Image (tube, helix red, strand yellow):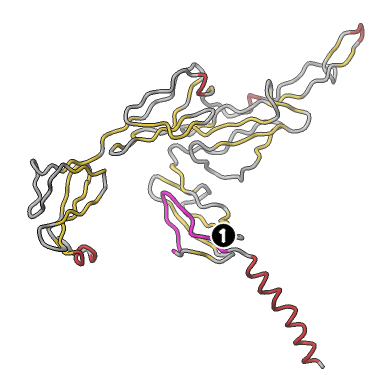
Amino acid sequence: MCIRYLGFILLIWFPRALHAQSAAQSCSAPRLDGGFFAPKQQTYSDGTELSYTCDEGHKPAVKGWWATSTCHNGKWSPEPQCIESIHACGEPPKIPHAVIVHQKYRDFFAADTKLQYECEDGYTVEGADTTKLIFCFSGNWTEGPTCSRETRPTTGQGGGTQPAGGGSSTTSGSTDRDSGPTFRPVDDCGAYPYIPNSDVVQKGRMFLKYQCKAFHTLVGEATVACYSDRTWSPLPVCKETFCVLDPAQNPLPNVQLSRVEYLKEGERKHFPCIWYDYSRRVQCTNGRITTTGCCSTYDHGRGICP
């Protein structure tokens, strides 16, 4: 009798246990620009903790030089992120009678981060609705909203009106906010800046983001904003970063090259040699061409081609 009862319990419990295990989703390997993580896997089971660190010039969006993230039902929490400290923003400004919504706290926020404030009940943003955005730009937050107490006119002695509470409306301590540069929407700044060999790849209300065209590298900050005096913040430039392989000027021995080839900075190409299954590996490094000898595909694959 006891054995039958135990078997009945197992029949009920086992499918539920399997369902609980299958309900917890695994996580794919995160994308981490500017850093690396361990252990290296394609997928991670629910509850797995990942350790990561960032390359030089970057740091985790949380305290310390290394950080952890945990797989929770198919998502990483907190999301692994490496940011460029030089353009990152610290703690967002504290605005009286307002809170930040839809955003987890971080010690650092990447450039172009957008945060939304919401005034508490009984307060409103001057000349707007109850929400307003700020942006991280060049290591500083754009100016935040001012939450003022709502006023309801009441009838006073002599038939006049006065704000509720017997006084004028008050503006909550703007002096308590962090000082920083003031900006205006980019559409109020006239024509967008022209940066040769670049395109605007992202447009926000308070910023433009540029990207250089092929064979060019951006020098400076990709994000541009409009100051309150309708001038633009410092503009980046797109510097030529490529190599030219001209067979007339620099012929490759034992390679039949019929036209000029262009290589991006850091790009590698293989050009066939006059022998079957042999080629030269050519690379553009710091604007200069470097090349191996003619080697077989096998030797290239093993990294033993001189």
In this rendering, is residue 44 above or below 120? Answer: below
Q: Position of residue 137 (x, y in %)?
A: 49, 32
Q: Which residues are magenta?
A: 26-40
Residue matched to label 1 = 70
In this rendering, position of residue 224 left or right of residue 179? left
- Is there any visible trace of residue 53 in the rendered image? yes
- Most prominent secondary structure in the magenta stretch? loop
Say which element carries label 1.
strand
Q: Residue 99: image x %, image y %?
A: 68, 36
Residue at the spot 43% in from the left edge and 22% down from the top edge: 192
User: In the figure, is residue 206 to the left or right of 248?
Assistant: right
Q: Is residue 196 above or below residue 166?
A: below
Which residue is at 53% across, 49% downward?
A: 62
Q: Position of residue 41 (x, y in %)?
A: 46, 65
**74 or 53, which is in the foreground?**
74
Can you say which quadrant of the picture contains the C terminus?
Answer: bottom left
x and y percentages locating residue 303 in the rendered image = 22, 63
Q: Amino acid at mark 1?
A: Thr
Q: Is residue 29 magenta?
A: yes
